[in-house]
Image (cartoon, grey):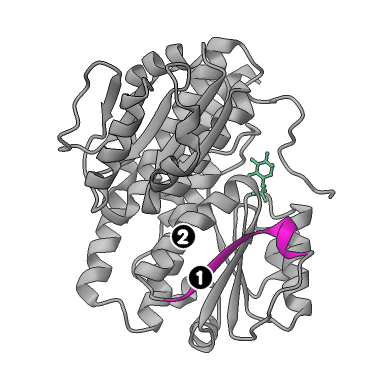
Amino acid sequence: GAAELGPYRHYMQKEIFEQPRAIGDTLEGVAGITPELFGDGAWRIFKDIDNVLILACGTSYYSGCAAKYWLEDIAKIPTQVEVASEYRYRTSVPNPRTLVVTITQSGETADTLAALRHAQGLGMKHTLTICNVATSAMVRECELAYITRAGVEIGVASTKAFTTQLAGLFLLTLALAQVRGHLSDEAEAQHLKAMRHLPVALQAVLALEPQVISWAEDFARMDNALFLGRGLHYPIALEGALKLKEISYIHAEAYPAGELKHGPLALVTSAMPVVTVAPNDTLLEKLKSNMQEVRARGGVLYVLADADTRIGSSEGIHVIRMPEHYGALSPILHVVPLQLLAYHTALAKGTDVDKPRNLAKSVTVE
Ligand code: G6P
């Protein structure tokens, strides 16, 4: 009811603003990296596997897509990510040395549970879930678990569950890196420090809300939007597009920026805003040339840029500068302005933010 909402108009807005608390709680008590964070016997299991298969649906699938970049980069472990409803019905090549990782807010999504059981049926016995509900079927059926502490999520469009999943997946990456000999004590200390700083960093990103509201006023008049990202931020672009379509009903799609020229560039006009997730990583120069391609076709850019990027606002380019550098944890911060963009666009359009048409919070039947 209204009392629970406090100063917020919708659960989704409340849940977006709860993220500093949700991430803080999810990482509370993590004094150091150890496989046992995922349950008794995790060390032996992590020693026994040589690849990771992530299975999930919806927003949880996108957190898995981001985790693939971490797992291969930091833990050096081959990783596949697959939509649960596809995996459960296709013929795949099972490998008993796979760690099957399911990601699910509810722990009750029918396709994700069926995908887990399918993998088990193929002889893959090492299973781990990143889940927000400790008493769920998923937690009962997996060998190992990390319980995120987002708290109850009411808005159908997932927000705090996503960022806490990323926090859990980052811990998993570090634990696997440790077991595989790719985590020095210095690196562990640095990563832990960056994780502990996340609640403060998230507060600084939430303070960008007024700038995002001015973007949302433009988006509310549009029928289409394109989201671009590269590398670790491509899954964030996917999640930003999903949020916008779910609650504002604007057709949105996301592309890895390098694919622009292979199709979506044909759609770019002044009626197609292009959101670019552009942190100052090694691909920035390439991303800048993708942005010029958009400008040359009259497209209007909305850029989430890093603190010290040299991209500035100009005709047709709207820049929001992120407060600081976040390194490997950058996706957790960059998704927040995209959540706010979807929220404020939906608000401007007057849609039912917490209960978008045709969608359910938890899809427990196929
Ligand atoms: C539904 C919800 C999404 C969620 C997805 C997967 O589609 O509307 O917000 O991401 O299910 O749910 P899960 O509980 O498995 O994360």
What's the residue at 52%, 23% (across, down)?
A: 343
Pair 2/1: label in front: 1
Q: Is 248 colored magenta in this rendering?
A: no
Amino acid type for the residue under numbered disc 1: Thr
Under circle 2, the secondary element is: helix
Q: Position of residue 208 (x, y in %)?
A: 32, 25
Under circle 1, the secondary element is: strand
Image marks 2 and 1: residues in contact by CB distance under 8 Å: yes
Vertical relation: 133 (above or below) 30: above
Q: Nearer the viewer, residue 58 or 91?
A: 91
Disc marking residue 79: 1
Range of the magenta residues? Answer: 77-88
Report the side of 237 relative to 360 (left or right): left
Residue on which the image places disc 2 = 67
The image quadrant where one finds the N terminus is top right
What's the residue at 46%, 53% (across, down)?
A: 166
Q: CA distance from mark 2 to mark 1?
A: 9 Å
Q: Earlier in the sequence, mark 2 or mark 1?
A: 2
